[in-house]
């Protein structure tokens, strides 16, 4: 359901999620503060010491681009790909201007327009945004040293197709970071295409187990953990999720 993300409401929620500072996202003296700053925390999963000069990164399902920009701190070139035209168009605008215009919604149609500057340590000139389909990547993209799939797999129709491509698009030693709360929805992924969340042959299957099994021929066993994140709907309503995270290294 690619059009799900092509609305003004989703666009603004993702701009706030990616670029709002902590007090703009959660304007209260209480609440789940550890869930703030998700995109910067996720980048912390990369073992920067293993990266070689000239490294290339890919952010699949980049939305409005925060992870893509964060990767520019230590990768020489970064490609962000997303199926939503409005997300990619806005990410491109941010690349050009270094400024993010968003609205901090309060109640109903009430909201405060805010301009946020992209942090100066992000190298915008290293970043390219492309409109595209993670299930059908062009061969011309080449190979990468870092690939991030953040909260993507439970939003595509054929997650196995995305995973099957990973050996082909990664160099030896590449780091692949996959995370998701694995909120499987029929609107995005038919039950028979899901990676986990069901019982098969009398055994419970989780998405992380299936991913690890699928990648085991080409990648070393993952380092795994949990990262919370918070999406602000409006001043008084939030969605908190906990992504299951794994980092795989290409053999
Ligand atoms: C839940 S959002 C996650 C965005 C971002 N990675 C993050 O963690 O903030 C899922 C994103 O995947 C994108 N997406 C869904 N299906 C896709 C596909 N087949 N190819 C590329 N992007 C896709 C959506 O447009 C959306 O931006």
Image (tube, grey):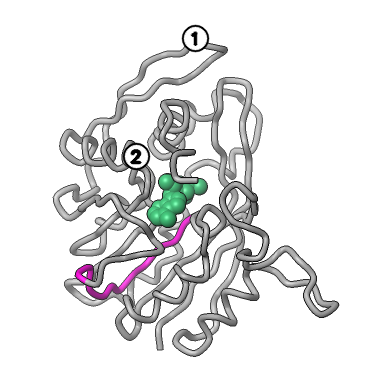
Left or right of residue 160: residue 87: left
Residue 164 sits above or below residue 14 on the image: below
Left or right of residue 190: residue 112: left
Q: Locate residue 221, reporting x and y percent.
A: 54, 83
Left or right of residue 228: residue 130: left
Mark 1 residue element? strand
Please rate how many residues cluster around mark 2, counting C-alpha atoms within 10 Å: few if below 14, some from 14 to 19, many from 20. Answer: many
**Circle 2 is placed at which residue position?**
87
Q: Reply yes or no: does residue 217 show up in magenta.
A: no
Distance, label 1 to label 2, CA atoms, is: 23 Å
Whether residue 116 is visible, yes or no, is yes
Mark 2 residue element? helix
Residue ID at (67%, 60%): 191
Residue ID at (58%, 78%): 212
Q: Locate residue 145, reporting x and y percent.
A: 30, 74
Q: Quadrant of the C terminus?
A: bottom left
Residue ID at (56%, 22%): 234
Quarter residue 175 falls in: bottom left
Q: Main secondary structure of the magenta part?
A: strand
On residue 110, the disc is 1
Does the closest atom of ligand 1 sit within 8 Å of the Cβ of label 2?
Answer: yes
In the image, which is nearer the foreground, mark 1 or mark 2? Answer: 2
Between residue 84 and residue 232, name the one nearer to us: 84
Residue ID at (20%, 53%): 128
Span highlighted in magenta in the image: 140-150
Residue 192 sits above or below residue 106 on the image: below
Please rate how many residues cluster around mark 1, counting C-alpha atoms within 10 Å: few if below 14, some from 14 to 19, many from 20. Answer: few
Q: Locate residue 139, reporting x and y percent.
A: 24, 72
Between residue 186 and residue 224, name the one nearer to us: 186
């Amino acid at each position: 359901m690619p059009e799900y993300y092509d609305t003004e409401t989703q666009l603004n929620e993702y701009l706030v999620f990616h670029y709002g500072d902590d007090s703009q996202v959660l304007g209260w003296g209480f609440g789940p503060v550890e869930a703030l700053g998700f995109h910067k925390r996720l980048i912390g999963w990369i073992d920067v010491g293993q990266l070689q000069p000239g490294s290339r990164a890919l952010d699949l399902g980049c939305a409005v681009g925060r992870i893509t920009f964060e990767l520019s701190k230590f990768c020489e070139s970064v490609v962000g790909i997303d199926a939503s035209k409005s997300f990619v168009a806005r990410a491109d605008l941010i690349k050009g201007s270094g400024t993010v215009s968003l609205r901090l919604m309060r109640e109903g149609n009430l909201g405060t327009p805010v301009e946020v500057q992209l942090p100066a340590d992000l190298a915008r000139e290293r970043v390219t945004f492309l409109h595209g389909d993670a299930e059908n990547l062009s061969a011309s993209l080449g190979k990468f040293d870092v690939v991030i799939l953040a909260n993507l797999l439970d939003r595509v129709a054929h997650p196995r197709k995305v995973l099957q491509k990973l050996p082909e698009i990664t160099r030896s030693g590449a780091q692949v970071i996959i995370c998701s709360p694995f909120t499987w929805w029929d609107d995005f992924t038919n039950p028979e295409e899901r990676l986990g969340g069901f019982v098969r042959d009398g055994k419970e299957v989780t998405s992380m187990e299936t991913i690890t099994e699928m990648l085991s021929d080409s990648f070393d066993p993952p380092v795994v953990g949990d990262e919370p994140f918070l999406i602000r709907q409006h001043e008084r309503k939030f969605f908190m999720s906990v992504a299951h995270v794994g980092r795989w290294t290409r053999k």
